[in-house]
C-alpha cells in the first residue's frame, strides 16, 4: 500500500488537494454566512434596545427583510428552491409575535418567505420589541393588538391577508378574526392560544402555570408597575426559566438574541375573556401548527385545544420547541406555504 501512495503522480496529488481545498472553502463559506446572519440579528436587537433607551414616544415598526437571498441561504445549505406560487391566491402573511417577543423573532421566517416570492409583514405589538409604550400601561387586548388592527383597517377594500400568530399572539389573531373576518383569508396558529368564546388566553397555559387566581396571588414573576399595593400589571420569567420553557431546542445564538430582546409581558391582555361569535370568528378558516417538543405549551395541551375548538387543519413539527421560527425554520416555512396553497 505504501508503494501505491508513493507512485501517485504529481497531477493526481494536486487534483486531490484542490478538491479538498474547494470542499473546505465551501464549508467555511457556509459557516461564515451563518455566523454573519446571527451577528446581524444580534446587532439589530442590541441597536433596538439602545434606541429604546434614547428616544421617547411610541414606535411600532413594520419589518421586512431587505436582503432575503443572502439571509435565506444558510437555512437551505445553499440549495433554496422557491416553491410554486400557482395555487396561492393570498401572498401577504402578517406575522404576529407572542408574549415577550417582538418583530425581531421572525427574522428567519421573513427571509424564507421572501425567498419564495411571498410578502411577509410583521410589527411590534404594544409594549413589545422597540415599541416604547410602557408595558405596565397596556391593560386590554384591544390596546395590545392596536398595531395589527390599524394595519387591517388600512388594507384596500378587496385585499385579504393570511394571519400567523405565535403563542399568545394567537389571542390577537382571534380578536382580529372577530372584527375583520372579511379581510382574513386564513388564520394560522403556531402553538398558540386558539381560545374559544368566553375563554382567556391565560387559561390555555393554566396546566403549566396553575389557575389564574393562584398565579395572581403567589407568582414570583409578577410585576407591580403601579406599586406593590396595586394589582400586578405584568410578568417576566427569569432567563434560565425562559430558556427551559421556550428554547429547549433552539440554537444557542438565537437564544442569546432572545435574552437581550425579550420584554415583560402585559398581564391585562392575557387575563381578558374574548367574545367570539359564530358569525365572524366561527366562519373563519383556522389552521393549527403543533410543536411536539414544546415545554411552554405541551403537546397534550395543544391536542386539547384543537379537540375543543377544531380548526380546518392540523400540522405537526417534530423536534420543535415553543419557537419553531428558531428551532425548525425550514419546517415551519414549508407548512406556512402548504397551508397558503390549500384552496
Image (tube, rainbow, N blue to C red):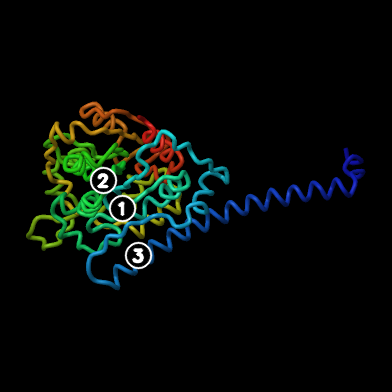
Q: Are marks 1 and 3 in contact (CB under 8 Å)?
A: no
Alpha carbons under labels 1 and 3: distance apart? 13 Å
The quadrant where residue 189 appears: top left
Distance from the alpha carbon under mark 2 to that under mark 1? 10 Å
Name the element at disc 3.
helix
The mark nearer the N terminus, 3 or 2, is 3
Looking at the rendering, in which quadrant would you find the N terminus? top right
**Coordinates of residue 112 in the picture (x, y in percent):** 45, 46
Residue found 47% across the figure and 36% down from its top: 84
Extreme left residue here? 229
Q: Which numbered dot is residue 48?
A: 3
Q: Residues within 10 Å of mark 2 (few under 14, many from 20)?
A: many
Q: Residue at x 30, y 33 (%)?
A: 287
Which residue is at a point 13% across and 48% down the rendered structure image?
Answer: 216
Of badges 2 and 1, nearer the viewer stands: 2
Q: Quadrant of residue 273?
A: top left
Disc with the residue nearer the chain's start (1 vs 3):
3
Foreground pick, 209 / 292: 292
Q: Nearer the viewer, residue 188 or 153?
A: 153
Residue 233 image position (x, y, % from top left): 15, 56
Which image quadrant for residue 170?
A: top left
**Could you say whether the residue bearing mark 1 is in a helix, strand or loop?**
loop
Q: Quadrant of the C terminus?
A: top left
Of mark 2 and mark 1, the one earlier in the sequence is 1
Q: Which residue is mark 1?
A: 101
Instruction: Check if mark 2's residue and mark 1's residue have beta carbons within 8 Å.
Output: yes
Q: Which residue is mark 2?
A: 169
Amino acid at each position: 500500500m505504501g508503494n501505491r501512495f508513493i507512485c501517485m503522480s504529481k497531477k493526481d496529488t494536486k487534483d486531490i488537494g484542490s478538491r479538498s481545498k474547494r470542499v473546505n472553502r465551501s464549508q467555511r463559506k457556509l459557516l461564515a454566512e451563518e455566523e454573519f446572519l446571527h451577528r446581524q440579528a444580534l446587532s439589530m436587537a442590541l441597536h433596538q434596545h439602545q434606541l429604546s433607551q434614547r428616544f421617547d414616544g411610541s414606535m411600532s415598526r413594520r419589518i421586512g427583510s431587505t436582503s432575503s437571498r443572502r439571509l435565506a441561504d444558510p437555512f437551505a445549505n445553499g440549495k433554496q428552491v422557491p416553491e410554486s406560487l400557482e395555487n396561492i391566491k393570498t401572498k401577504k402573511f402578517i406575522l404576529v409575535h407572542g408574549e415577550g417577543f417582538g418583530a425581531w423573532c421572525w427574522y428567519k421566517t421573513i427571509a424564507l418567505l421572501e425567498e419564495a416570492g411571498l410578502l411577509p409583514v410583521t410589527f411590534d405589538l404594544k409594549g413589545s420589541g422597540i415599541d416604547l409604550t410602557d408595558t405596565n400601561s397596556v391593560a386590554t387586548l384591544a390596546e395590545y393588538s392596536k398595531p395589527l388592527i390599524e394595519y387591517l383597517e388600512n388594507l384596500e377594500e378587496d385585499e385579504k391577508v393570511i394571519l400567523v400568530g405565535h403563542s399568545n399572539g394567537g389571542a390577537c389573531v382571534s380578536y382580529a378574526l372577530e372584527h375583520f373576518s372579511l379581510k382574513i383569508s386564513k388564520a394560522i396558529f403556531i402553538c398558540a392560544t386558539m381560545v374559544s368564546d368566553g375563554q382567556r388566553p391565560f387559561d390555555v397555559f393554566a396546566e403549566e402555570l396553575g389557575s389564574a387566581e393562584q398565579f395572581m396571588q403567589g407568582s414570583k414573576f409578577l410585576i407591580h408597575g403601579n406599586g406593590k399595593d396595586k394589582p400586578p400589571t405584568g410578568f417576566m420569567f427569569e432567563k434560565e426559566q425562559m430558556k427551559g420553557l421556550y428554547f429547549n431546542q433552539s440554537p444557542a445564538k438565537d437564544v442569546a438574541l432572545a435574552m437581550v430582546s425579550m420584554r415583560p409581558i402585559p398581564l391585562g391582555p392575557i387575563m381578558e375573556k374574548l367574545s367570539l361569535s359564530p358569525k365572524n370568528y366561527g366562519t373563519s378558516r383556522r389552521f393549527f401548527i403543533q410543536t411536539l417538543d414544546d415545554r411552554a405549551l405541551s403537546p397534550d395541551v395543544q391536542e386539547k385545544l384543537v379537540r375543543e375548538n377544531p380548526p380546518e387543519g392540523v400540522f405537526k413539527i417534530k423536534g420543535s420547541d415553543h419557537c419553531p421560527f428558531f428551532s425548525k425554520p425550514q419546517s415551519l416555512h414549508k407548512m406556512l406555504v402548504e397551508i397558503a396553497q390549500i384552496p
